Image (tube, grey):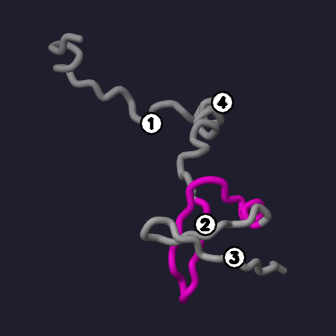
Amino acid sequence: MTTAIRTRLVKIGNSQGIRIPKPLLQQSGISADVEIEVQNGCLLLRAVSHPRAHWGEAFAAMAQHGGDALLDDDLATDWETDEWEW
């Protein structure tokens, strides 16, 4: 069960903001950027997901298991091998 915490809106330029108490931030895992949207008349606040956040670990594991080889054979044409100068 969650406990509701009351807070006030604070004027910030032409906008308004709220202060989010530390216990709520710790429980939510929010630490930096957030996304805000309206759902059924309520504001929904969530941490921004970073889809590429763990790619480095995934690529390292893939290389460790040999999954980083090219899928295609060498598709060089005669022109590329004979005529092209590197």
Q: Earlier in the sequence, mark 4 or mark 2?
A: 2
Of circles 3 and 2, which is in front?
3
Q: In the rendered view of the protein, which quadrant contains the C terminus?
A: top left
Q: Position of residue 51 (x, y in %)?
A: 54, 52
Question: Please, which residue is most extreme toward the bottom here?
Answer: 40
Instruction: Inspect the image, locate mark 3, and give the three-letter code of the amino acid beneath it.
Output: Thr
Q: Residues within 10 Å of mark 2 (few under 14, many from 20)?
A: some
- Judging by the rendered image, the residue that carries numbered circle 2 is 46
- Judging by the rendered image, the residue that carries numbered circle 1 is 71
Q: Residue at x 18, y 15 (%)?
A: 84
Q: Residue at x 68, y 66 (%)?
A: 20
The residue segment tinted magenta is 24-47
* Magenta segment includes 63: no
Q: CA distance from mark 3 to mark 1?
A: 56 Å
- Judging by the rendered image, the residue that carries numbered circle 4 is 64
Q: Secondary structure at mark 4?
A: helix
In the figure, is residue 38 to the left or right of 4?
left
Image: 6 above or below 76: below
